[in-house]
């Protein structure tokens, strides 16, 4: 865990004073002449700067971990939100026989076939006994119904399977 270094300034009697010494041939040696040191300040050392590097590294690791978790949460929400589709089924055979079967293509292919499809009857011109979803694949599934209705409109909620 990062332990912060509370840096303190070095306070001297004359902060910008220098002494100038002539070396000859137009050369001069400039040296700081700060006077008395009133407060020593924090030492600029390997230990203090190394601690700062450790804090930056720790921060980068935490940001990476948090962004990874955020992505997982977003993927989970996408799975829960799912996809909503509308399908029209028509039966041309006489009851109890049915040929109202349709292959529904997923607009966004799933990564696994472990998704659920919840069905909702939006409109029907007769009784619908049962709606069956089967043959799930990564990019499509089949849906059919049994009952005496000739035309049925279904709303399908596809949940999961994306991640």
Image: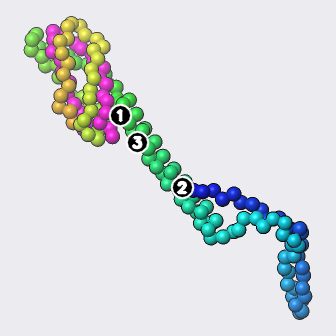
- Bounds of the magenta span? 138-163
Give the answer, above or below, for where 97 lies relative to 75.
Answer: above
Q: For the residues carrying marks 3 and 2, which lies nearer the camera in this image?
A: 2
3D distance between C-alphas at marks 2 and 1: 36 Å
Residue placed most toward the observer, 111 or 73: 73
- Determine the residue positioned at 40% across, 34% down: 77
Expressed as whole percent of the image width and height from the top left, the position of residue 20 reads 90, 82
Residue 24 visible from this viewpoint:
yes
Which residue bears the numbered disc 2?
Answer: 1
Q: For the residues carrying marks 2 and 1, which lies nearer the camera in this image?
A: 2
Q: Is the magenta stretch mostly helix, strand or loop?
A: strand
Q: For the residues carrying marks 1 and 3, which lies nearer the camera in this image?
A: 3
3D distance between C-alphas at marks 1 and 3: 11 Å
Which residue bears the numbered disc 3?
Answer: 72
Q: How crowded is mark 3: few (under 14 residues within 10 Å), some or many (20 or more)?
A: few
Apparent side of residue 156 relative to residue 1 in the rendered image (left or right): left
Expressed as whole percent of the image width and height from the top left, the position of residue 156 reads 29, 23
The number of numbered discs placed on residues in the rendered structure image is: 3
Q: Residues within 10 Å of mark 1 (few under 14, many from 20)?
A: some
Which residue bears the numbered disc 1?
Answer: 79
Residue 91 visible from this viewpoint:
no
Residue placed most toward the observer, 143 or 1: 1
Q: Where on the picture, by quarter, is residue 136?
A: top left
Helix, strand or loop at label 1? It is helix
Expressed as whole percent of the image width and height from the top left, the position of residue 14 reads 89, 69
Q: Which quadrant would the C terminus be assigned to in this image?
A: top left
Q: Most extreme residue toward the bottom, as rendered?
A: 25
Helix, strand or loop at label 2? It is loop
Helix, strand or loop at label 3? It is helix
Magenta stretch encompasses residue 61: no
Q: Where on the picture, by quarter, is residue 157?
A: top left
């Amino acid at each position: 865990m990062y332990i912060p270094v509370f840096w303190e300034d070095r306070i001297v009697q004359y902060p910008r004073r220098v002494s100038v010494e002539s070396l000859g041939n137009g050369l001069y040696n400039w040296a700081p002449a700060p006077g008395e040191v009133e407060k020593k300040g924090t030492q600029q050392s390997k230990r203090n700067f190394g601690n700062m590097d450790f804090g930056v590294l720790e921060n980068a690791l935490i940001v990476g971990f948090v962004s990874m978790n955020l992505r997982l949460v977003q993927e989970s929400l996408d799975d829960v939100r799912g996809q909503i589709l509308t399908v029209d089924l028509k039966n041309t055979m006489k009851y109890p026989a049915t040929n109202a079967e349709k292959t529904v293509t997923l607009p966004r292919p799933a990564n696994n076939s472990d998704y659920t499809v919840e069905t909702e009857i939006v409109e029907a011109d007769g009784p619908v006994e049962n709606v069956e979803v089967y043959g799930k694949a990564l990019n499509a599934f089949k849906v059919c119904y049994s009952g005496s209705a000739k035309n049925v409109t279904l709303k399908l909620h596809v949940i999961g399977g994306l991640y």
